[in-house]
Each structure stands twice: as C-alpha cells, then as structure tokens.
Amino acid sequence: MSEYQCYEFVALDRRLTSKEMAELRAISTRAEISPTRFWNEYHFGDLKADPATLLARYFDAHLYFANWGTRRFMLRLPARSVDTAALKPYFTTPRAKLSKTGAFVVLDFWSDDEERGDDEEWFEGGRLAALTPLRSQILQGDLSAAYVAWLGSVQSGEVDERRKEPPVPPGLGDLAAPVASLAELLRVDPDLIAAASEASAARSNDTRALRAWVKALGAAEKERWLLRAIESPDLALGLELRAAFRKGRRNGASIARRTAGDLLARAEVLREARLKREAAAKERARASAARARAKALDRLAKREQAAWSDLEKLIDARSYDKAVALAVDLRDLARRDGSLPRFDERLAALRKAHARRRGFFDAYKRRVSSP
C-alpha cells in the first residue's frame, strides 16, 4: 500500500487576508488555497508546518488523514465564548486534548488504527464539512461531541476503569449527524455509545424553555447582554445565550455517575445481545430466502421442458445474463431432485448445438464456479 496523507483546514469566522494566503503559499506551493480553505495531499513527503500552529494562527477547523490509520480533527474556538471549565473533564488523554493558545481554546481529537488502516476513498466526500457544525454546537453548550471523544479514550484504555464518567449530555441515544460523524471518525464502538446513552436524556428542542429563561432574567442581566451585543456587533450572541442557558441546566442536574469500567462491561453485554439479534435476523432471512427459492423451483419444475426451450432462445438472442440465470435455476432444480446427470447431458447437448455462443458458456462457468 502506497503512502497517502491529506490535510484540510477551513476558516469559519473570517476570511484570510492576501498576506496570510501568501504566508500559506510559502509553506506549500502545491496546496489549494482560498480565503477560507487550505487543502493538500501527499503521496510522499509531508506538510512543512505544524498543523496545530496553522490552526491556531489562521483557521477554525482542521482534518488530517493518513492511510496507515491515523485520523486527527481539531477545532479552534474563541475562549471568551466557550465554557472551558465544562469541557475540561472530557479532554484528559492524548486522544482528546484541550489547550489554550492566545484568545482561543483548541480541541484536538485523535484516532489510530495501524493494523487496519484506511483506503484513500474514506477521506473523500466532505468529511470536514460534516464535522464543522460541531463548533457551533459546542459554543451553544452542547457537550455530546466532548462525551463521545471521552468514550474514545475509554475504548483505547487511556482512562482508568475506576474513573467516573463526566456529566452525561442529552441526545446520546440519537446522535446528531455531526456527532455521529465524529464518532465514526474516532472509531468509537457503537455498543459503547449505546451503553452510555442509557443514562442520557432524550434530545429536545429547548427553544421554548430558553425563551422563558430569557424573559425571567433580571433587568440588570438583560442590560448586560444588550450591552455585549452593542459593544461586539460581530459576536454570536445567540450561541452564548444558549450556552449560558444550558450551563444553568447542567448545574441543576444530579445523575449518578458510572465508571469507565462499568461502561465497558455494559457495552460487552449489549454487544452480545446485539450479535444474537443479528444472528437470529440472518437466520430468519436465510430461512425466508430458502422458502422463496423452494417455491420458485417448484414453479420451474412444472414448466421444465418449456424452460429448456426458453434457454435456447435466450442463447440464440445473446441475452446471456438472463440465459445464465435460467441455467443456474435449472441446475439447482436438478440438484434438488437428484437429476444432475440428466442436466449435464442436456447442457452438453446445448454446448454442441450452440458451439459458437461461447459467451454464454463462459459466463455460466464463471457463475457456477464463483463462491
């Protein structure tokens, strides 16, 4: 397998200046660079810069992919708008890190699977675009992405099994699309997520409750929010209001915390139950297909002689796909009824009579010899 790496960065809150784009061009002459995006791939060599440094200086989101199994996703958030204290309990390992750089908080997500690796095609299809909405969700106080990242650390064994879980956010039982994309990126076991979701409230539209909360704010508090809007007209005030509202809700919540070991054990129980359900479903599907096949062969048996005539016509018309399918049906009927020698004789006679139709006989041979 040849080496392949891909780097993508996007700017969400502002456009890059001409000077900044020139600085990026000095780093890479081959990269695709626009006022909002930097993208480059490597089949040999590597990016001549530290991705974390590029993110901190120019961009708001970054995705890295290497086909030997490494995936990395990073988000840069304005420190004044993010509840760092609420996020820290989820980012405690090398696979999920939180750091501060200047006026920003950086969240760093990692996943490695060298034994399996990844095809280059996995990276295609707007992977970063599917993840960037997480930034807005986190700024609104949604901690589900942070919790999923923590589960990835639990799964990798980087969290002591005796350690209690951080606060469980709502919605784990029905992950929002961006969070589901993150779970896939980090290769988090769906059974582990299912175990965690058992203590997660259903995700709900809290707009009505938010409106009631805003109306109940004191005059001084409302004035403070209005002044912030005037002093910082570019501020995403709605995000901060929702984050403050959700923070108040979390502070009022009291749920018994499970340990990492509890979650792993419960995930194993759920996995065993799921595998049993899937095996039972496969057996039901197999039995149903067998019954349907038996009925089809019963119908074919009633018109077997006519079917052989149809087969000759299909071969003459070079309708080889339909001819092969019918020949296989006739073979299966003969096998079921114990008359394979007679089938072989008739097929040999067909081969002799239609020697110039090798396309059919070659296709039939490939079909019956395939597993």
Image (cartoon, rainbow, N blue to C red):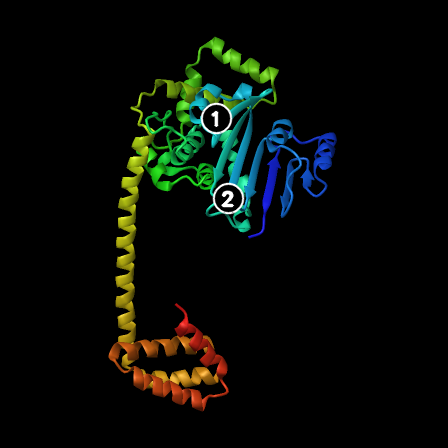
* Callout 2 touching callout 1 (CB < 8 Å): no
Residue closer to the observer: 155 or 355: 155
| Disc 1 element | loop
Work out which quarter of the rendered image holds the C terminus and state it.
Answer: bottom left
Q: Residues within 10 Å of mark 2 (few under 14, many from 20)?
A: some
Q: Which mark is residue 69?
A: 2
Specify whether residue 145 is in view: yes
Report which residue position mark 1 lands on.
Answer: 140
Residue 341 in the image: state x and y as whole percent: 30, 85
Specify whether residue 211 is in view: no
Quarter of the rendering containing residue 184: top left
Residue closer to the observer: 274 or 314: 274
Residue 212 in the image: state x and y as whole percent: 40, 20
Looking at marks 2 and 1 on the same chain, the residue that comes earlier in the sequence is marked by: 2
Residue closer to the observer: 2 or 32: 2
Q: CA distance from mark 2 to mark 1?
A: 32 Å
Residue sitting at 32 percent across and 33 percent down? 263
* Disc 1 residue type (three-letter): Gln
* Disc 2 residue type (three-letter): Gly
In the rendered structure, the answer to whether residue 278 lies left or right of residue 176 reads: left
Q: Which mark is residue 38?
A: none
Residue 257 in the image: state x and y as whole percent: 31, 25
Q: Residues within 10 Å of mark 1 (few under 14, many from 20)?
A: many
As drawn, 305 above or below 165: below
